[in-house]
Image (tube, helix red, strand yellow):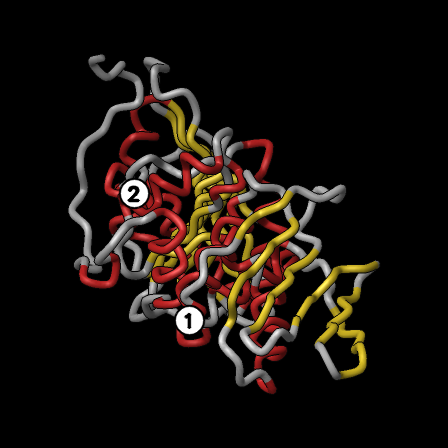
Amino acid sequence: MIALWDTKGKDVVKALSAERRSAGGLTSGLALTLIVVAEERNVQQAEAAATIAAQQHPCRLLIVVRGDVTNPRSRLDAEIVVGGRLGPCEAVVMRMYGRLALHAESVVMPLLASDVPVVTWWHGQPPDRIAYDPLGVVADRRITDTAQSPDPPAALADRAEDYAPGDTDLAWTRITPWRTLIAGAYDTVDAPTKSVRITAPPADPSTTLLAGWLAARLGVRPTITAGEDHRLSGVDMSLGNHGKVSIARTNGTAVLRRTGVGDRTLPLFERTLGEDLAEELRRLDADQPYAAALAAATGTHGLDDRPPTRVHIWHDPGISEPD
């Protein structure tokens, strides 16, 4: 590891090149550049998640930690790690203070790996508008997490209003196991769905997106009932032939029940943050099922018709916006 204190961007670039040569790193072996915007308290968690994801997608990891932008003195501290504790990662952790934090792209852009896609992940509360953050504008794919917002339903509405093809959210990724089970349950169903009931916390954005996905796919608006568990615990579907299909969570498994068919016990494991991140890094094109679910969940239309590129909008968080 190389540590640079009160340094400059060009010195970080030189140090990364030197460390890569020393460790035998090859740019051609990188699948992408992953930019992570994180708070100081989340840096270790972000590193751990990226290490898991990098086992499937070797990447250059650029972690940006923005300090107080009102600090009168700008400063850049950097840590460079190639391999080692982060596995097949080339990592640079950059802590930016003062006005430099508002221009993080000036340091990050020269560090992007050449000829590979760029993914930006906000590990924390996402921005109101991604165009406010040039680190999102430069990315081919953008990952937010509305569950990290103090008001997840409002954050989900913001994501729909601000959506562009290439956006996704980890609240959507977390329901992939449930979507897989539900899709599998319908393999032998030939009757239309009359009603759907989801048992889950109503304010959970994953619940809202699951309801949107089911509404988009089945043409039926699900009802959401709060259960005793703090997680998504069950989905019940009533069919037009008076049959029923239900999936219920129980201790790391799910029980699938269908009218006229014996019960089946299927795996339903809790995934780590790194596994969720790795799933999102598998695809770098527009996630149309997510767009359809987000549109149905929020009542927004035409998400797929929007342009995938963004133009940076200058936004200074150090200045209060007018009422």
Against 28, residue 286 (above or below) is above
Badge 2: few (under 14), some or many (20 or more) residues near its Cα, within 10 Å?
many
Looking at marks 2 and 1 on the same chain, the residue that comes earlier in the sequence is marked by 2
Specify whether 85 is left or right of 291. Answer: right
Q: State the residue position of label 2.
A: 130
Q: Label 2 sits on what residue type?
A: Ile
Taking depth in this image into account, of 232 and 321 the one nearest to the observer is: 232
Mark 2 vs mark 1, CA separation in Å: 20 Å
Q: Are marks 2 and 1 in contact (CB under 8 Å)?
A: no
Q: Please, what secondary structure does the residue beneath circle 2 have?
A: helix
Q: State the residue position of label 1.
A: 283
Badge 1: few (under 14), some or many (20 or more) residues near its Cα, within 10 Å?
few
Residue 174: x and y in percent read: 58, 57
Q: Residue at x 56, y 60 (%)?
A: 196
Taking depth in this image into account, of 205 and 285 the one nearest to the observer is: 205
Taking depth in this image into account, of 5 and 83 the one nearest to the observer is: 83
Q: Label 1 sits on what residue type?
A: Arg
Taking depth in this image into account, of 127 and 251 the one nearest to the observer is: 251
Going by the picture, which residue comes out furthest to the front?
242
Against 175, residue 41 (above or below) is above
Specify whether 148 is left or right of 44. Answer: left
Q: Which mark is residue 123?
A: none
Residue 151: x and y in percent read: 48, 31
